[in-house]
Image (spheres, rainbow, N blue to C red):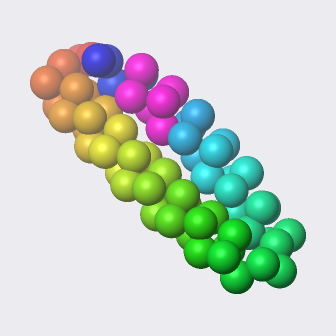
């Protein structure tokens, strides 16, 4: 996967994270809040992984890309 592909995937995941965050703000149900928090944690991990992939891909390409 290229750095651009990883960054694009991270942006997609960030959109999902924002959507889940909005869901969390709208709920008063503690059980649903816990589920959304778990989803947020998982999405954050996935975003971090994509950013790490992008960094490694960019470093592999060298400074001239």
Residue 20: x and y, percent?
68, 56
Residue 15: x and y, percent?
66, 43
Residue 53 lies in the magenta-colored region: no
Q: Is residue 29 left or right of residue 8?
A: right
Asked if residue 37 is positioned above or below residue 7 in the image, the reply reads below
Magenta region: which residues?
5-10
The residue nearer to you, when weighing 33 against 10, is 33
User: Which residue is most to the front?
Assistant: 31
Q: Quadrant of the N terminus?
A: top left
- Residue at (66, 76) in percent of width and height: 31
Q: Is residue 26 left or right of residue 63?
A: right
> Which quarter of the picture shows residue 32?
bottom right
Asked if residue 6 is positioned above or below residue 26 in the image, the reply reads above
* Residue 63 visible in the displayed image: no
- Residue at (85, 70) in percent of width and height: 26
- Residue at (42, 22) in percent of width and height: 4
Asked if residue 42 is positioned above or below residue 65 in the image, the reply reads below
């Amino acid at each position: 996967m290229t750095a651009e592909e990883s960054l694009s995937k991270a942006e997609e995941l960030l959109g999902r994270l924002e959507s889940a965050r909005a869901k969390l703000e709208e709920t008063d149900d503690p059980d649903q809040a816990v589920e959304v928090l778990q989803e947020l944690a998982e999405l954050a991990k996935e975003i971090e992984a994509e950013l790490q992939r992008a960094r490694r891909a960019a470093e592999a390409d060298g400074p001239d890309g």
